C-alpha cells in the first residue's frame, strides 16, 4: 500500500484492523495477490521520480510555448464552469515567469502528487493495463502503457489543485500557481490519453464531464449544507467514480468485457476510499467535511457518532459492489488475486481511519462545528 500517511501501512496499524491482519497473513505466506501487488508497488516506487520529472518537463514546455496564457485561462474557466479557479489577467505574467523554472514547477508538481488517490492508484492502473494486454493477447507496448497510465494519473491529479483552490484547506501559498498550472495539466492528460485511440479519448471526455458535474454539485452543496439530500450526495460522488471508473475502463482500452468490469470495480472502490478520506479529513480538521457522508448522516440522525458509523456502513456497501465485479471476470483471469488484495487494502484504509477517529475522541468538537 502507498499513501500520504505511511503510518496507515505500518505493522502496528495493520495489526489493528481485521483486514490488516489478513494483509499480514498474505504477506507472511506470500500469496499470489500479495506478490502481484508488491510487484506493482515496487515498480511505482522505482518509476515515480521519473514520472514526476516527465510531468514537470512536459508542462514546463507547454507553459513556455504558450503565447496567450490569458486565453488559456479563460478557456479553461469556461470548460470547468468556474471563474474561481483561474487567474485575473494582471496576475498571469509574474506567476508564469516564476513557474518557468524547472525547480519551482517541480516543487508544485510534487506537492499535488502527494495525494492518497494518486499514490494508491498508480500501481493499480499498471496492473489493469497488463491484465488487459494478457487477456486480449495484445503485443506489449511499453510506450502505450506509459502514455495511457500517465495520462489518467495526471487527469486524476488535476482534482488535487482544483480541490485545494476551492476548499482553501492546504497549500495556501501556492494556490495562484495551481491556477496557472491547471489548463496545462488537463491538456497534457488529454494528449497522452489520446495515444490510446479515439474511443479511449472519447470515454475520458465523457468521464471528465461527469466528474465536473459531480465537482460542481459538490461546490454548490457547500452553500447550504443542512439541506443536502442522499440523492444529491450520491450524485456529487461522480467526482470519484467517474474519473476512476473511466480510467479503469481505459486500461482495457475501453474494450468489453474487461473495460466494463474495470469501470464498475474501480468506480465503486474509489467511492469507498472517498468515505475513508472524509473520515481522515474530519480528524485532521476537527470538523466534518462539507459535503460528505459523515455530515449527511450526522445531521440526519442528529448524532455525530452515529453519522460516522453509518458512513462506515456506506463504505462497506461501496466496497461490496466493487467485490461483486470479481464474479464477472473471465475464467483464469491473470490478476484476480491482485484485485482481491487491492480491495482488502481499501477495507484496511477505511477501518484504520475509523479506528483512529474512535481513539481521537473529538466527538464534542465535531458536533460543535456542525453547520447550523
Image: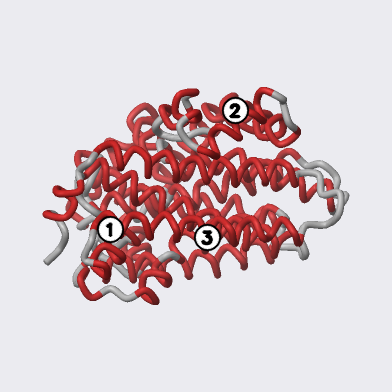
Q: Classify 10 Å Cα crowding around label 3: few (below 14), some (14-19), many (20 and above).
A: many
Residue depicted at x 64% and y 55%: 323
Most foreground residue, 337 or 77: 337
Disc 3 is placed on an element classified as helix
For marks 2 and 3, give the CA distance.
Answer: 24 Å
Which mark, residue 85? 1
Q: Nearer the viewer, mark 2 or mark 1?
A: 2
Circles 3 and 1 in contact, beta carbons < 8 Å: no
The x, y position of residue 177, in whole percent, is 28, 43
- Disc 2: which residue: 24
Residue depicted at x 15% and y 63%: 371
Quadrant where the N terminus sits is top right
- Disc 3: which residue: 318
Q: How many marks?
A: 3
Q: Is residue 89 above or below residue 335?
A: below
Quadrant where the C terminus sits is bottom left
Q: Nearer the viewer, mark 3 or mark 1?
A: 3
Amino acid at each position: 500500500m502507498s499513501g500520504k500517511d505511511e503510518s496507515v501501512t505500518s505493522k502496528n496499524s495493520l495489526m489493528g484492523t481485521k483486514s490488516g491482519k489478513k494483509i499480514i497473513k498474505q504477506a507472511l505466506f506470500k500469496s499470489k495477490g500479495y506478490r502481484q501487488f508488491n510487484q506493482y508497488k515496487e515498480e511505482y516506487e522505482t518509476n515515480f521520480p521519473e514520472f514526476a520529472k516527465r510531468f514537470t518537463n512536459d508542462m514546463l514546455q507547454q507553459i513556455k510555448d504558450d503565447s496567450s496564457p490569458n486565453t488559456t485561462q479563460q478557456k479553461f474557466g469556461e470548460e470547468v464552469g468556474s471563474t474561481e479557479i483561474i487567474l485575473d489577467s494582471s496576475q498571469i505574467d509574474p506567476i508564469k515567469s516564476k513557474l518557468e523554472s524547472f525547480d519551482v514547477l517541480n516543487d508544485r508538481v510534487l506537492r499535488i502528487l502527494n495525494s492518497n488517490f494518486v499514490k494508491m492508484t498508480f500501481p493499480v492502473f499498471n496492473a489493469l493495463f497488463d491484465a488487459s494486454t494478457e487477456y486480449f493477447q495484445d503485443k506489449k507496448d511499453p510506450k502505450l502503457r506509459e502514455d495511457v497510465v500517465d495520462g489518467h494519473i495526471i487527469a486524476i491529479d488535476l482534482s488535487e489543485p482544483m480541490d485545494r483552490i476551492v476548499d482553501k484547506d492546504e497549500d495556501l501559498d501556492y494556490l495562484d500557481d495551481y491556477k496557472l498550472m491547471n489548463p496545462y495539466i488537463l491538456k497534457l492528460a488529454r494528449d497522452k490519453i489520446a495515444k490510446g485511440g479515439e474511443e479511449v479519448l472519447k470515454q475520458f471526455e465523457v468521464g471528465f464531464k461527469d466528474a465536473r458535474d459531480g465537482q460542481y454539485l459538490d461546490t454548490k452543496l457547500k452553500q447550504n449544507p443542512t439541506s443536502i439530500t442522499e440523492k444529491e450526495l450520491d450524485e456529487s460522488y461522480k467526482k470519484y467514480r467517474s474519473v476512476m471508473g473511466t480510467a479503469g475502463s481505459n486500461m482495457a482500452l475501453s474494450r468489453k468485457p474487461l473495460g466494463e468490469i474495470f469501470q464498475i470495480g474501480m468506480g465503486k472502490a474509489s467511492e469507498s476510499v472517498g468515505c475513508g478520506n472524509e473520515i481522515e479529513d474530519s480528524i485532521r480538521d476537527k470538523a466534518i467535511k462539507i459535503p460528505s457522508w459523515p455530515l449527511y448522516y450526522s445531521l440526519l440522525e442528529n448524532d455525530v457518532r452515529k453519522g460516522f458509523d453509518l458512513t462506515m456502513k456506506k463504505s462497506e456497501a461501496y466496497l461490496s459492489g466493487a467485490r461483486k465485479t470479481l464474479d464477472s471476470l473471465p475464467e483464469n483471469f491473470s490478476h484476480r488475486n491482485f484485485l482481491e488484495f487491492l480491495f482488502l487494502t481499501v477495507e484496511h484504509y477505511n477501518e484504520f481511519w475509523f479506528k483512529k477517529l474512535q481513539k481521537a475522541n473529538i466527538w464534542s468538537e465535531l458536533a460543535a462545528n456542525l453547520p447550523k
